[in-house]
Image (cartoon, coloured by chain):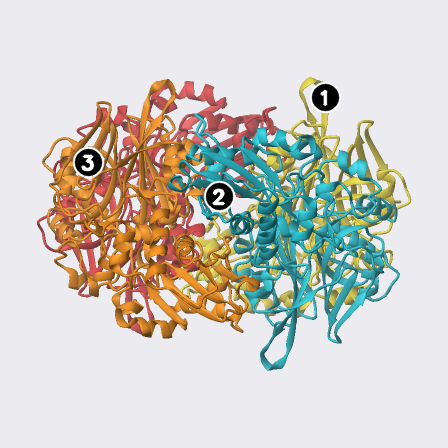
Chain colours: A cyan, B orange, C red, D yellow
Amino acid sequence: MFDKFHEECGVVAIYGHTEAATMAHLGLHALQHRGQESCGIAVSDGRTVACHKAMGRVADIFTPDTLNKLQGAMAIGHTRYSTAGDSQLLNAQPFSINCIKGQIAVAHNGNLTNAAELRKMLEMKGAIFQATSDTEVILHLMAHSHERSLPDALRDALLQVEGAYSLVVLHRDGIIVARDPHGFRPLAMAQLELAGDRTGYVFASETCAFDLIGAVYLGEVEPGEMVIIDSDGLRRERFYQQRNTAHCVFEHVYFSRPDSLVFGRSVQLSRERMGQLLAEACPAPTADLVVPVPDSGVAAALGYAEVAKLPYRQALIRHHFMGRTFIEPSQAIRDFGVKLKLNPVRDLLKGRSVVLVDDSIVRGTTSRKIVRMVRSAGAREVHLRISCPPTLSPCFYGVDTPTKKELIAANNSVEEIRRFVEADSLGYLTLPLLRRAVDDAERLDFCYACYTGDYPTDIVNISELLAAPRPSAR
Amino acid sequence: MFDKFHEECGVVAIYGHTEAATMAHLGLHALQHRGQESCGIAVSDGRTVACHKAMGRVADIFTPDTLNKLQGAMAIGHTRYSTAGDSQLLNAQPFSINCIKGQIAVAHNGNLTNAAELRKMLEMKGAIFQATSDTEVILHLMAHSHERSLPDALRDALLQVEGAYSLVVLHRDGIIVARDPHGFRPLAMAQLELAGDRTGYVFASETCAFDLIGAVYLGEVEPGEMVIIDSDGLRRERFYQQRNTAHCVFEHVYFSRPDSLVFGRSVQLSRERMGQLLAEACPAPTADLVVPVPDSGVAAALGYAEVAKLPYRQALIRHHFMGRTFIEPSQAIRDFGVKLKLNPVRDLLKGRSVVLVDDSIVRGTTSRKIVRMVRSAGAREVHLRISCPPTLSPCFYGVDTPTKKELIAANNSVEEIRRFVEADSLGYLTLPLLRRAVDDAERLDFCYACYTGDYPTDIVNISELLAAPRPSAR
Amino acid sequence: MFDKFHEECGVVAIYGHTEAATMAHLGLHALQHRGQESCGIAVSDGRTVACHKAMGRVADIFTPDTLNKLQGAMAIGHTRYSTAGDSQLLNAQPFSINCIKGQIAVAHNGNLTNAAELRKMLEMKGAIFQATSDTEVILHLMAHSHERSLPDALRDALLQVEGAYSLVVLHRDGIIVARDPHGFRPLAMAQLELAGDRTGYVFASETCAFDLIGAVYLGEVEPGEMVIIDSDGLRRERFYQQRNTAHCVFEHVYFSRPDSLVFGRSVQLSRERMGQLLAEACPAPTADLVVPVPDSGVAAALGYAEVAKLPYRQALIRHHFMGRTFIEPSQAIRDFGVKLKLNPVRDLLKGRSVVLVDDSIVRGTTSRKIVRMVRSAGAREVHLRISCPPTLSPCFYGVDTPTKKELIAANNSVEEIRRFVEADSLGYLTLPLLRRAVDDAERLDFCYACYTGDYPTDIVNISELLAAPRPSAR
Amino acid sequence: MFDKFHEECGVVAIYGHTEAATMAHLGLHALQHRGQESCGIAVSDGRTVACHKAMGRVADIFTPDTLNKLQGAMAIGHTRYSTAGDSQLLNAQPFSINCIKGQIAVAHNGNLTNAAELRKMLEMKGAIFQATSDTEVILHLMAHSHERSLPDALRDALLQVEGAYSLVVLHRDGIIVARDPHGFRPLAMAQLELAGDRTGYVFASETCAFDLIGAVYLGEVEPGEMVIIDSDGLRRERFYQQRNTAHCVFEHVYFSRPDSLVFGRSVQLSRERMGQLLAEACPAPTADLVVPVPDSGVAAALGYAEVAKLPYRQALIRHHFMGRTFIEPSQAIRDFGVKLKLNPVRDLLKGRSVVLVDDSIVRGTTSRKIVRMVRSAGAREVHLRISCPPTLSPCFYGVDTPTKKELIAANNSVEEIRRFVEADSLGYLTLPLLRRAVDDAERLDFCYACYTGDYPTDIVNISELLAAPRPSAR
């Protein structure tokens, strides 16, 4: 309902816990914000791999009954945001298949930029595709590999794909996780202390999943690294030579939960730092107070208020009991959509000059509604501050973004945007400051393509991709 | 899941809008926090009264299909929290009946303290009761009244009942709303500007319902007042002589949404004031930062931080994607229940001395889990501050409270509670300060019975009530 | 979907079986043909009465989970067909209430002809009505009764009502069943042999319910009789002086299951006898074979074939996998509705002259479709034979019938009907023969009002009833 | 619930009707008896192929909404019975995939006897399998074919598979149907007269599907024949040389609807003929009447009664309102399972000697319950007659049969079976007579393997198959 970029998935993997599916399900619960349209869990008991997936949210799909049927000590899970066109069970993950290598299930966060080419090549070899997701390509590449062992076949497959992937793979006897050489999407690793001094392992897109199930964070799966766990223990292996790291900075700006470590950094601290730098660069001298657009603007607003020495006030309240559909009366309610989610506290805003802190402006229409809401609650001035640079370019690494045409900043100056959103002033965090906020000023370990159009990988078919409808999610 | 007192209902009424049911449904959406187990809407098109109610949340129950069947320009709605024993559709509201006075639907927030006596008396007269709710009593009293007109019959009924009620009544030709002489529960009134210079009216438990549908707040329905609207227009009538006002202070402490005006006051401002006074009275000299228990502790924590001149940090993140049930693995997860909802931001807490601000301690078990969570995230010290006095006594005016035996403060000193919740220090806002926070220090317009045991009405059967299972909700 | 009169309910009662709800549920399963829109069970464990009811079929509503919550050794159950206007949960039975006499649940098959008058009188006394069903009237009469004991109060109530009722009543300590003085609707009684030489009792609309649960048929509850069972044992009591018996003959013609005894007679034998007499009275000399319209025409067709010495052939096959809705293609399929249920066996019909035996013609449209279907499957001649007289008049005793205007036989001669249904000949069983078929030729123990318009009770408001939309079902 | 062999699928295909999905859905409705656990429809509008499938019955799955989304003039449909182990959506049909040949959807009735070998071979070539169904093998073979056109690729695939298949294939531009060279399972063809003199085509497992949608039967798709329809018109092509025909005789004995033509013969007439021959071969001289076990025993019982010159009586009534689960009280009801479906008419059975006609005895337990039921309803003697020979061997051509160990006739003499089922006498139709009944005495066009163990094809891995759990259904 909000006009945001959408994270396209979360993944989790469990090894060595007798109730692996239950643990995976809790992990998915913690990752629910990364995708709410379908989810699934595959589990192995050492003999066969079973899988359950469905459209909907984790808490609705995984009932005690369902979980009881998923017995085994190894599991992977996936939660998915799907783009309009392909909201089908068919594309829900994990994908679970049989091939010459045995039973394999896979769940994927990211997007392959050469999926279409690979798919054509595989179809020439006789492959049949049941879904539109690019993840199926990886399975076919594994199945066609001449390598005997699963880790070797997976490496073989990954050397052929381009783009972003944080991958969890389950087979009868173990799990393998892998991350693309650029490390676009996060993938963290943790340890479970179990009864009888046994150790279990957990992998997840974000560390908030570890906190819920009481696992101890060990660090990131490295870009270009594969971690193989089976009865022989855990082995880490670099399957790809060093390449430039390109962590998605938007994970810190908006996607991830503030209580997570992502790429080894606290998201909350990154956001507070963004707010602090934003206050230095774009002050609002006449302002009386700082108000976040909840929930994602909260940390940056706190940072802004601290540096600006202005009171921080939660003058917009977010309503969390959401349903799928609401009927608007035919005699239309002004700014209906935003009102369903946000409501101002008038007594805090009346007659005040407000710095409103948000994390992004996508099309601009939602921002305008929020500015109007604050103003009509009595604010004298509204100074909009955005905790990252203007978003100019679509993402091809696993984020659902509008086309360039729809992105207001791709087609308008900051002053034009200000006028459109009806703010008294508008300030964006600059790219150099964003890089400082995530401690990436010296190095260049993050991907900023959505702010720069400068993609960290060669995308041969980029013109096609830009013209096409949005890539299918996973 | 959290150990809180529970508000037991929200009500809404619409007069004069051609899509009254849709408007009522939006109003209920805004009041969803007041009760999430059942909801219903009754509507009149001037000929008959139709009603739809079901178990579940507003957004799930009122589909476009359902709303389309509820045609008419007058509607009332209800959302209900139900206590364990009577979670049945039977008790869902509005109640809609036929009697000598015609078709009547009624929705009620509050609790009648003499319902049992009235019920016995009515049964002696041949009345049959289908539900366990006390609201049915009001309908029977109206049906048995010798008064001809509905407003007269309602007045007749209300003069016989004791206790708390904010009542919305729908009949074929109009609506009537009424509030008990003590004004225990809130009931506000607003105006809808409609096409063609017509005016509509809205009544709701909280003003956040007005904001969503774009109605303009006019003020409170007065204690002991009845507002009658039909084709003759709107009439306000005092049906009960002046009695001592007794607004439920817990509406400001916890129940109501911070963006609402309740009893004519901003809830957010009350809570910030509670935090400010709490900081003065219970400072934490060694503390490094102030952290709220979200979401209800946020405003008080902001007030506390302001006065204490300590940084305010959102170091506990609340997870909003909740389902009904979660399976805990048999190898139990420490403090599982709280972890499903809250997670600490370790980097903000590590090595710090923390003031943790919450709005209440009921049984103490949840507070202990939260203190432990903060400590195990690395906090050096945890100073728990509660933005109201210890809760000692159950409520008989429409709040679902545990029995005295279960209330930790009814049976333990503050020091004992501190030890139980494992905090380094524990401070409560005193009653005089709470009264100052809601500007009730001079007058005595609020009910503080849950902190004092001093009930503002005579409750003849109080020993029975205290012994009995909790009163049925509405 | 078929154009039939509809039975409006089935009732069951269980006393003395530790799993009374489960037994009641099985009984309702056997009575499912008597009403498929809602059903419910109320149960008493000697302390309280619990009730569960919902829209839908027995097998869908009473899951193991639901039944487990209905503990107790006494139960009543109800299955209901509802007319268009009032298909609401509100009218589902049993009704379960509290009143001065305690908790009472009641389920009712039949229709009270003076319900409107009683309702007005009760409303004058302050009664409130939640449903539109006339059964609620009985509960109010009981609650208003000055009699102390429940059986006395029930007798008091029944002496005031007119019309048809087979009633099962459950209270905390026992059950009471009662049947109207005319015995319009059936109500049979059986015994359950239980472990430890204990005896249980079962009451049901039809004996097929006894067969399923292994109860031994004892006989009918007599018209004007009340059977009271509680810890003092079973007592039978005549609460009304002898009146002319008026069993609904349509129970034997169509409603009841052929494997039931109804009014003490085998339904199957009655129907075979109707067919035999029909063959004598309306032979079809040129016919080659006899074909029933399944399922209800089967027994009469067998009787017809036997006497006519013609082969009996099942040349119309009924399809039993029915759903609620089917989309007809816009390029319409001829006689779509009937085709969904029936299909001819061409090889049996080709070139043959067919006697088609059905149990009734209501509006005539369905009969015409069936005649056409048989003819287009190749039949040379179609001779339609109906196993009862033309239906002329609506029923006010618990059957859902169309208005007089819609009844083809009320407005057309037999020859006109024949032409309308496009049959080569048409024959009805005459009233005298129908009476012979049910052994009622000498006496007059059955109600034939739907064939004669001669109602066995005075219906003071009959002109109103005839003008009004159909009476609400129960 | 009944102890029967289970037909494992029905298929339908529509070409040239603008509402092809709606027509397919009606066709599936008519074929619902061939499989009730899942169903699906794939449709092409000439641009893309869309597919909807789900667990459940046709009427529940294909709502108006669902059908509206399936636009196009070509469609195929499938209804499936699934064996215990693989009751998953994954195996529901049609399968719809993308490959080098484009989008293909396929639905299959039958069973491939060399699926496991082909699967291994395909996996060696890199194929990945998502389901356990053998139908997926056909798609892989097509995708791997070097033939360019779809019909050629399908022929290529079919020349590699062994076993039974009636196949409907949908692609963007047309449909192809094919039947295995032995013609195990039925597949019939019909014509639709459409507005504007256009012609449409329909294919279905049974002709009852044609009757419902008003299509005119043209004949069988020949064994080894492929029918190709696209914008170039309809072409029939023999893809396999003549082999011995082997129609499944059990289609006539039990599976198919009596109102269908199957293998070009009336099922009803076959069954009546079986009954006639059974009466000649196994008379019951002392019997008073003939009673069918409904519904499948009805036609044979009519034939038996005719020849035996005994009255035919429907003394067992079948109950058609079935749910999935029923709770049996812990104090068990005798022969509970059978009672849920059947009930005797005592007045027809009391003191009589009964010939009971059924179509098969599988494990014997159900037959025993029915014999007991008839006897306890008062029958003096029960003579059981079965309208086919003893079933000795499992089926590998698409029927779900118990293992040899479970088949009572595989391990017991007729006399032993008689004793087990507690009948006074037991007679089976002999194989020669069964062949006469289906006019196959001279030729040998039917498969009788379940009676003889003599399989019409070489099954190389038969010992494996016999040892393994039942083959997966389709």
Query: Is A133 positioned to the left or the right of D345 in the image?
Result: right
Which chain is indicated by disc 3? B
Instruction: For marks 1 and 2, give the one nearer the viewer.
Output: 2
Residue that label 3 marks: B226
Q: Give x and y (percent) for residue C198.
A: 28, 70
- The answer to whether the residue labelled 3 contacts the one labelled 1, judged by CB atoms less than 8 Å apart, is no
Query: Is A228 positioned to the left or the right of C135 in the image?
Result: right
Q: Which amino acid lies under the numbered mark 3 shown in the image of this protein?
A: Met
* Other-residue count near label 1 (Cα within 10 Å), few / some / many at <14 / 14–19 / ≥20: few
Q: Give x and y (percent) for residue A327.
A: 46, 34
Residue at the bottom extreme, as displayed:
A196
Write down the quadrant of residue C297 in the picture.
top left
Q: Give x and y (percent) for residue B8.
A: 31, 51
Residue that label 2 marks: A323
Q: CA distance from mark 1 to mark 2?
A: 48 Å
SS type, badge 2: loop
Between D431 and A365, which is closer to the camera in this rendering?
A365
Which chain is indicated by disc 1? D
Image quadrant containing the N terminus of chain A: top right
Query: Is D413 positioned to the left or the right of B174 in the image?
Result: right
Q: Which residue is at 46% across, 32% downward? A: A328
- The answer to whether the residue labelled 1 contacts the one labelled 2, judged by CB atoms less than 8 Å apart, is no
Residue that label 1 marks: D198
